[in-house]
Amino acid sequence: MTMKRMVLEIGMGTDIRGADHTKAAVRALRDALWHNSLTVAGALGLDADSMQVSVTIGVPQPDQVDKRAVLAVLPHGTGTVEVVHGGLEIPNDQGTDATIMAHAAAVVYLDVA
């Protein structure tokens, strides 16, 4: 059997106040996942937990994302997280806070013939 790319899900998340990159990243992945109901594993006779999910998160400051918190969002399967430079940081008028916008891509792989 071979791991095959089955699904690409994309999402966007924000932290309006607080400039929390992890919160924005978690919301981006939830946005990507919660708008879908994947039945492809079951249709192929596989368990949903057999999915392997490769998550890429784009935020302005990648080192500020807790990858474990992002992975905890996955309802099935196992995953990996790569955090890259991207998204947006929008400062408030006073320069004392910012809105963080994160983008997420989740690629689902299954071991199929």
Image (cartoon, rainbow, N blue to C red):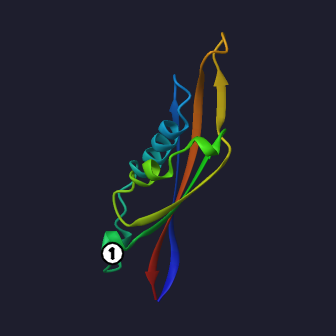
User: Residue 95: x, y in percent?
Assistant: 67, 15
Relative placement, left or right, of 45 versus 107 is: left
User: Residue 8: x, y in percent?
Assistant: 53, 61
In the displayed structure, 29 sits above or below 74; it is: above
Rate crowding at label 1 as few (under 14), some (14 to 19) or many (20 or more) other CA atoms within 10 Å: few
In the displayed structure, 83 sits above or below 94; it is: below
Residue 88, quarter of picture: top right
Q: Who's the residue at 52% across and 25% down the image?
A: 16
Q: Three-letter amino acid code at disc 1? A: Ala
Q: Residue furthest top?
A: 94
Q: Who's the residue at 66% across and 10% down the image?
A: 94
Give the mark count.
1
- Residue, disc 1: 43
In this rendered view, identify the residue nearer to me: 106 or 72: 72
User: Residue 27: x, y in percent?
Assistant: 46, 40
Q: Who's the residue at 52% across and 43% down the image?
A: 25
Q: Who's the residue at 39% across and 52% down the image?
A: 72
In the displayed structure, 57 sits above or below 47; it is: above
SS for tag 1? helix
